[in-house]
């Protein structure tokens, strides 16, 4: 049986959207898929050495439940959604939301992004960074983790054209 | 059931039970049995799918008090 293959384009640079590419890639690798992730635009944030740049913002995201990860049950069940205009003017709102989400993640036994990224690398998931956006955003190769390859759209197609699953995230 | 290695994946959520199982299976030899404990309700379907795709045999799945026990035989 031929080895199955999966390619993912990761384009989002927030804490919440960091999950789908790393969860799917690590699982695919565990299932025996040869897997590659192409990081482009904001997705480049996912391969930075410093992952503390990843934040989550409830602003303009009506789908995000705003619940407290601590306290008694009745307190945890309250949804703290508030109007965008108010969210926008509270200093540090994003940092607080990010800290709360990280706590919720830990409470639920969900892996952290640094852990999932490392699991992907251990499983030999190939990481490719889009050289064009690296330059466009003024990054240096030294901003990124080791083991990254740099390439463009043609590099992506070389592998993606032979895959069984190809996702844009 | 007899087993050769045990993996405690209780408290871990998707996809960690699968990733840990993959790692644990690498540490046993062909024909040996891995026992897996999990509290993730999604792992029931996931381990069945994992077995189907990797060729490792899922010998049994059991649930008791919100805890799942799987026995998987390495290909």
Image: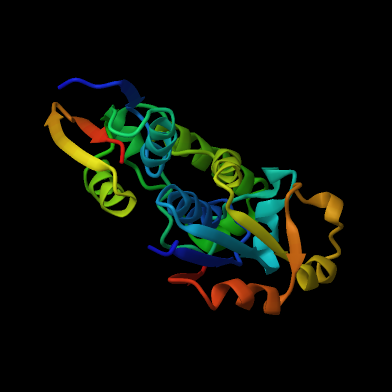
The number of discs equals 0
Scheme of image coloration: rainbow
Q: Residue B39, percent across and down?
A: 27, 32
Above or below, comparing residue A132 to residue A31 in the picture:
below
Depth check: B26 or A26 in front?
Answer: B26
Q: Quadrant of the N terminus of chain B?
A: top left
Please report the residue visible at 43 percent of the width from the left and 52 percent of the height from the top: A32
Q: Residue B51, percent across and down?
A: 27, 47
Q: Residue B71, percent across and down?
A: 22, 31
Depth check: B54 or A144 in front?
Answer: B54
Q: Is residue A144 left or right of residue A101?
A: right
Please report the residue visible at 68 percent of the width from the left and 62 percent of the height from the top: A128
User: Which image quadrant is residue A96 in?
Assistant: top right
Q: Quadrant of the C terminus of chain B?
A: top left
Depth check: A130 or B25 in front?
Answer: B25
Q: Residue A162, percent across and down?
A: 52, 75
User: Which image quadrant is residue A37 in?
Assistant: bottom right
Please report the residue visible at 49 percent of the width from the left and 34 percent of the height from the top: A103
Q: Is residue B66 left or right of residue A114?
A: left
Please report the residue visible at 33 percent of the width from the left and 22 percent of the height from the top: B5
Above or below, comparing residue A159 to residue A149 in the picture:
below
């Amino acid at each position: 049986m031929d080895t199955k293959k999966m390619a993912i384009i990761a384009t989002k640079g927030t804490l919440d959207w960091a999950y789908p590419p790393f969860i799917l890639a690590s699982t695919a690798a565990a299932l025996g898929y040869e897997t590659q992730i192409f990081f482009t635009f904001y997705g480049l944030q996912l391969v930075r050495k410093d992952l503390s740049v990843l934040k989550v913002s409830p602003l303009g995201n009506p789908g995000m439940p705003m619940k407290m990860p601590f306290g008694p049950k009745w307190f945890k069940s309250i949804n703290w959604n508030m109007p965008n205009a108010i969210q926008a003017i509270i200093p540090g709102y994003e940092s607080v939301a990010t800290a709360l989400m990280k706590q919720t993640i830990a409470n639920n036994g969900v892996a952290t992004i640094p852990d999932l990224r490392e699991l992907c690398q251990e499983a030999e998931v190939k990481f490719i960074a889009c050289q064009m956006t690296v330059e466009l955003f003024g990054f240096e190769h030294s901003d990124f983790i080791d083991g990254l390859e740099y390439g463009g759209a043609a590099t992506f197609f070389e592998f993606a054209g032979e895959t069984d699953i190809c996702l844009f995230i | 059931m007899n087993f050769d290695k045990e993996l405690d994946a209780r408290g871990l959520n998707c996809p960690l039970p699968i990733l840990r199982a993959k790692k644990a299976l690498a540490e046993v030899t062909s024909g040996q049995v891995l026992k897996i404990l999990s509290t993730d309700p999604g792992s029931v379907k996931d381990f069945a799918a994992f077995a189907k795709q990797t060729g490792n045999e899922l010998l049994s799945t059991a649930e008791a008090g919100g805890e799942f026990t799987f026995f998987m035989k390495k290909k």
